[in-house]
Amino acid sequence: MEKKWWKESVVYQIYPRSFKDSNGDGIGDLQGIISKLDYLKELGVGVIWLSPVYESPNDDNGYDISDYKAIMDEFGTMEDWEELLEGLHKRGMKLMMDLVVNHSSDEHAWFIESRKSKDNPYRDYYIWRPGKDGNEPNNWTSFFSGSAWQYHEETDEYFLHLFSKKQPDLNWENPVLRNEIYDMMKWWLDKGVDGFRINVINLISKEDGLPSTPGGKKYDWGGDYFMNGPRVHEYLQEMNREVLSKYDMMTVGECPGASPEDAARYANEEGTELNMIFTFEHMDLDSGPGGKWDVKDWTLADLKDVMTKWQKDLEGRGWNSLYLNNHDQPRMVSRFGNDQEYRVESAKMLATFLHMMQGTPYIYQGEELGMTNVKFDSLEEYNDIEIHNMYREKVTEGGEDHAKIMEAIYRKGRDNARTPMQWDDSEHAGFTIGTPWLKVNPNYKEINAENALKDPSSIFYYYKELNRLRKEHDIIVYGTYDLILEDNPQIYAYTRSLGEEKLVIMCNFTKENATCTLPEDIQYESASLLIGNYVEGTAEERLEGLQLRPYEARVYRLN
Ligand code: NOJ
């Protein structure tokens, strides 16, 4: 397997709006990030992924871009951005920008032109269709509830928007549009960025003829007609030829609905498309048949199945990304761990579980502090467009129970991840001296960076140690993965192997003690503990009949 810097790196995601406010307007900004570069350096991460900082009317917090080459006023100026890049590079870190090119904002100059008339030169930059029998052109629904089409009276046509109606989909069938995008990418790369996280990139090719789903439903989820569509690989190979292959850079494509088979093409070892993708399969383990908001409990058996499938199916064929939360997902410690009694232990256990797998690990801001989900009393305190649209559809219009939907928001809402970063125990957690755009989590007095940095046994320093070990041991990056103790209902255990070397990783996912009986072929007599989340008494213990304490994680090195 080829060695690459982006396989060996750990990525840290910043959601700029919530990271650090420098000017008291309640909104995080670039100077705020710059003031925390030494914090990031201390953590030992190699790459920063910056969620969008481009000019945007913020219908979807920057994922609706109105100018791809300008910085959002609230975040600062291009000079601030250049200072950030320089500050990162000076400290040996890299910068990965978010690239949002499945759609733009409806306030982008292209769309403003496009909607002027049917023969405008920009008309074909977007996906316009006439209605059918007084209805939308097809029955697809948007990711953010309701129809995926918006009627435009002046030109008597509809435009497609897979997300909000202020996020019209770009028409990738149009080669002129594709070239504009490639030029824009080169413009940023020439300014010195080191990579792109490419937003919902597997949605860019829609099925020919944009058919309705079968079955005659007025509105229906049309995912099969736009996820991993017919020309997506052709477009990515073109992007790779025109842009990506010309730079020493890193790419990760966000790909909802992609299987490992799809991923083996998107993230192929030959490097003809992207470096890696974000899968969603493990993020769907607590979704019932009704989708994201139909919340059910996830099971350890399912987690083993899904993670193992991705580890084994991509082995030697493609590269995995490893994540348990981001700005669209609930906090991992609340979702997969225990955010009460065992918050610290389970946060470290989950970190171990993830970072020891094969792939590039991603840390989402605040994860290194064990930040948790939040429960706001009223819907008005939430900001996210997805939450508000869903609530309107289900409760206001659909008559569903308010309390039930609030429960779903507590468990799955994206604002769980977007509450401001908790820096210290001063008002608003040291995030801003103004009024934060989204309320801080009330637990900031206890959970904050200042406390973490003072405590050598904090989650922060545990991550730092994981990041250090990754640099020291090739096996953590390149070793092959194998699941062990498959049927154990409490423990997720696996091995990594590289040449003569072997690691055994054991993670107790429960708050009860668990007995770990390793398979006989694992020679543990000469094992040494590489890392573990309980400080006392681990190194000398024998592995035979090992008792793992609540949410305990251990990594042993054999040979
Ligand atoms: C995925 C992004 O991560 C999410 O935040 C956004 O709302 C959608 N794509 C639409 O751009």
Image: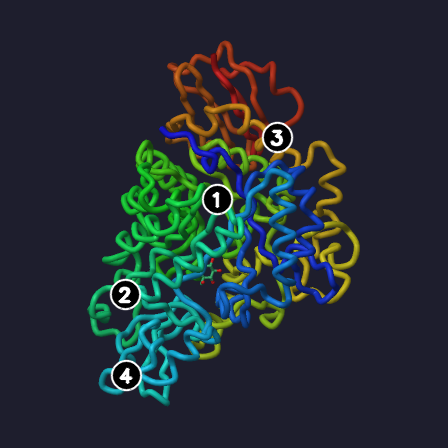
Q: Residues within 10 Å of mark 3 (few under 14, many from 20)?
A: some
> Residue 465: which numbered mark, if any?
3
N-terminal label among 3 and 4: 4
Q: CA distance from mark 4 to mark 2?
A: 24 Å
Residue 298: tell me if it is visible: yes
Q: Specify whether 352 is left or right of 223.
A: right
Q: Which residue is mark 1?
A: 323
Residue 341: tell me if it is visible: no
Quadrant in which the N terminus appears: top left
User: Where residue 62 sits in the image (x, y, percent)?
Assistant: 53, 64
Helix, strand or loop at disc 2? loop
Q: Which residue is mark 2?
A: 173
Residue type at the position of mark 4: Asn
Report whether the residue tagged 4 is closer than 8 Å to ligand 1.
Answer: no
Report whether the residue tagged 1 is closer than 8 Å to ligand 1.
Answer: no
Helix, strand or loop at disc 3? helix
Q: Which residue is mark 4?
A: 135
Residue type at the position of mark 1: Tyr
Q: Residues within 10 Å of mark 1 (few under 14, many from 20)?
A: many
Q: Specify whether 105 is left or right of 380.
A: left
Circles 3 and 1: CB atoms closer than 8 Å: no
User: Where residue 160 sits in the image (x, y, percent)?
Assistant: 34, 73
Q: CA distance from mark 3 to mark 4?
A: 58 Å
Q: CA distance from mark 1 to mark 2?
A: 32 Å
Q: Residues within 10 Å of mark 2 (few under 14, many from 20)?
A: some
Q: CA distance from mark 3 to mark 1?
A: 18 Å
Q: In the figure, 431 relative to 143: above or below?
A: above
User: Where residue 468 sits in the image (x, y, percent)?
Assistant: 59, 29
Helix, strand or loop at disc 1? loop
Q: Which residue occupies 41% across, 59% down?
A: 183
N-terminal label among 4 and 2: 4
